[in-house]
Amino acid sequence: MALSAPIRNAAAAAADRAPTVSVRDLCHWYGSGENRRQVLDQVTLTIHPGEVVLLTGPSGCGKTTLLTLVGALRQVMAGSVRLFGEELREAGRRDRQRLRCGIGMIFQGHNLLRCLTAEQNVQMGADLLPGIGYRARRDLARGWLRQVGLGDHLHKLPHDLSGGQKQRVAIARALAAQPRLLLADEPTAALDSRTGREVVELLRGLARDQGCSVLMVTHDPRILDVADRLVRMEDGRLREGRFQEGEESGAVR
Amino acid sequence: MLDRLWPSRRIPLAWLLLSRQPARLAVALAGIAFAGILMFLQLGFRDGLFDASITIHKLFDADLVLLSPRTMSSIAMAGFPRRRLVQVMADPAVAGTTPVHWNFLLWRNPQTRATRSILALGFEPGDPLFTDPSLAPKAQVLSQRGRVLFDELSRPEFGPIASWFRQGRTIDTEVGGKRVRVAGLVSLGPSFGADGNLLTSSETFLSLLPNTPPGSIELGLIRLHPGEDPAAVAARLKRQLPADVAVFSKQGFVEFEKNYWRSSTAIGFIFSLGAAMGFVVGCVIVYQILYSDVSDHLPEYATLMAMGHPLPRLLGVVAREGLLLALFGYVPAWLAGQALYALVRSGTKLPVAMDGPRSLLVFAMILSMCLGSALMAMRKLADADPAEIF
């Protein structure tokens, strides 16, 4: 699939703007009492507008927990998470729900609604935009599906789409809400290497066009080079820009 | 067109959730329709039985009626002195009165020779009895002794009287052990207490029941001059007459009879309980459907919450599913109710019909059933934790 994503230095362009995400000294625990287990320990991370950050690390190291905290899906326990300049630690359920409207989420499983067509699924994302008429939102959804190369599959149910096509619908849905931040949790896990590569490049291209930051958790060594910055997590701690053998350290620009 | 009228509308998620699973939707609608039919049938029987108890009562040509205070219902009519009705004539508001004898007698089926209890009314053939004017000319033949008018709508167990009569056959049979001849047909209808009816003159009536004191009647019909207020006259008569009679308006007479069947028998309770069972069965079915629907789609609901759709909007989806189920389930229930009522009418001659209040009542019950179940199923939605889907 051919996509002409304009390449620009997102990190440099974003330097003079406020960060999209600013995490400081974030700690998180699961369980309580004796079973209490720390999963995040003094995590500090800043993502600037338009920046693509890849988060890697062994499973169980707290990557997904960090993603759910940044995504305003969990209550912050200790430390600080500022999302679009708002402090999440103080935010209640309704505030977090409102903030989530500005975040696009792409899941490991595509998590599309089975009963909706591709177009309707994408429109569920566009429906989050306030003050836009039904037809405009539908046209928006169609436009996004064309952008991800599914213009011919508007009225297919997820059941009738391939894995790569479903993940592309999920990307279109996430972007249709015009988010300022995209969170992706192993979006290529269910895809073969070539499709995975295509999907990730598409994701990066579209996010950059939108000036949308991306935080992507991945195990997939073949896609590390799409990142502006690579962050490694181990045992609940972040180690930025340092890689073990076997990983492609050249990915960091 | 719709887009312009309603620009803020969203994907009709509730409808799509239901319609993209046609098998489950069909089961749900069948269940709701079944519950609705059950309610229609039970309430229809109940109201039909109450209405059937007053088939005769509605026909009388009267503004006020006199009954004995010992009368409990149409199947237990007690007598009171006929001269009370003569006393009533003294009131200037009263235009006319008709004394009526009322009792159950054994009718012998002329074909099978079997006997069966029939309601016999005795009156002076010249007096007005029913509001239907076609009775007066037929009543002339009753002045001959031993003649009766047979109700052609009586149940068939009384014999093929109507068809024999139309063929011109002379029908002689036995009533209360005495020989009578059917001299004509009237159209009244069976009631809950009486499977059939016959009319005769007071003279013949007393000869069929020789133990009846001649000065005693069971029902007194009172007609007022036009423009008189029945309630005021009834109050006046109550003051003037001794306590051995009770005064009712015609509507009060009808209600008195209905009330007997409602309060003194188990009919109302039994059929209301039947309708309640339908309601409960419907609740269980709808709740089961909606609950499993929410459970099956829990990850999808969680995804929508993660995307930023507010919880109230998702609760609204479940509520709308309930509303749609109620609407789509009610229509077949109503149509099937119509068909079953027609079946009941032809099979039992009970006056059961689909009326507005009952249609509304059943709709309200189906609606509350579906929305209540939706409300219960919504609690499951609180389990959808958007943090769990990553």
Image (cartoon, rainbow, N blue to C red):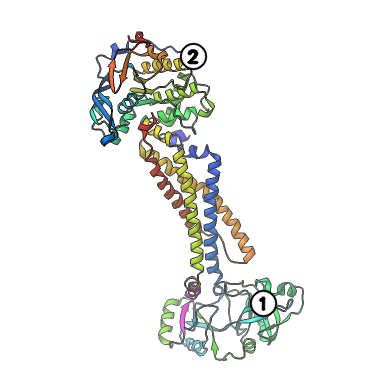
Indicate the quadrant containing the C terminus of chain B: top left, top right, bottom left or bottom right: top left
Amino acid type of the residue that numbered disc 1 sits on in the rendered structure: Phe
Q: Is residue B346 magenta?
A: no
Category of crowding for the residue at label 2, using alpha-carbon neighbours closer than 10 angstroms: few (below 14), some (14–19), many (at least 20): few
Res B118 label: none
Percent across and percent down for residue B41 are 55, 59
Percent across and percent down for residue B157 are 68, 73
Q: Mark 2 = which residue?
A: A1
Instruction: Establish if B47 lies above or below B220.
Output: above
Which stretch is magenta? B242-260
Quarter residue B208 falls in? bottom right
What is the spatial separation of the Cα atoms under label 1 and label 2, in whole angstroms? 92 Å
Res B150 label: 1
Q: Is residue B386 left or right of residue A152?
A: left
Of the two numbered discs 1 and 2 in the rendering, the one whose residue sits closer to the viewer: 2
Q: Is residue B37 left or right of residue B306?
A: right
> Is disc 1 in contact with disc 2, using a CB cutoff of under 8 Å?
no
Q: Is residue B190 left or right of residue B260?
A: right
Label 2: element kind: loop
Q: Nearer the viewer, residue B209 or A62?
A: A62
Instruction: Establish if B165 lies above or below A204.
Output: below
Q: Is residue B253 magenta?
A: yes
